[in-house]
Amino acid sequence: MIRRLVFLFSGSAVFWLLVGLPARHLGGGDAAMVFLGTALLLCLAPAAATLIWGEWALRQAPDKQLILVLGGTAVRMACVLSSGWGLYLWAPFYQRQDGFLIWLLIGYLFTLALDMTLLVVGRTETQGPIS
């Protein structure tokens, strides 16, 4: 479990560098790096929570796995959207910056894909198929 969490955090850091640095040099400036970094940080907490929850749910009955899928999506979206929207409305650096919302979407989709990949690849054969 710890190894997957480390991979989630380090994969996000590598993504931040591999996507943020070119965006910075292609006209996004320092704001692109800050927006992407903030977006990834906002997405990492719910991603880590759903990864831990998923590890537990894959050892449970199929009905609990369904709750993971629906509940994990709801938790992740609620956390990321509410905190991102709060920054967009009230934090001076992010206020009314549409670029931040675009980077938030990119960061959300990346962490979602990485989280689900780690969850599916990390399950053992004794856990059986995901239902």
Image (cartoon, grey):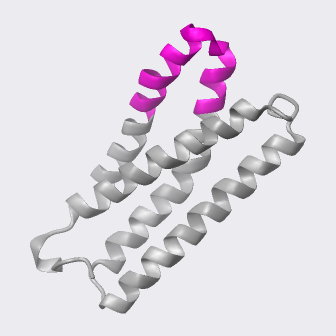
| Whole-percent x, y for residue 13 in the image | 44, 32
Q: Is residue 126 above or below residue 6?
A: below
Residue at the image position 62 percent from the left and 41 percent from the top = 104
Quadrant of the image occupied by residue 100: top right
Q: Is residue 92 above or below residue 77?
A: above
Quadrant occupied by the N terminus: bottom left
Residue at the image position 80 percent from the left and 33 percent from the top = 94
| Whole-percent x, y for residue 92 in the image | 88, 31
Q: Is residue 1 visible?
A: no
127 to the left or right of 59: left
18 to the left or right of 34: left
Please name whichever residue, 38 or 70, is drawn nearer the observer in this view of the structure: 70
What are the residue bounds of the magenta stretch? 13-36
Residue at the image position 58 percent from the left and 14 percent from the top = 24
Q: Is residue 10 visible?
A: yes
Give the residue furthest to the left. 125
| Whole-percent x, y for residue 38 in the image | 64, 36
The rendered magenta stretch, by its main secondary structure, is classed as helix
57 to the left or right of 19: left
Please name whichever residue, 39 or 99, is drawn nearer the observer in this view of the structure: 99
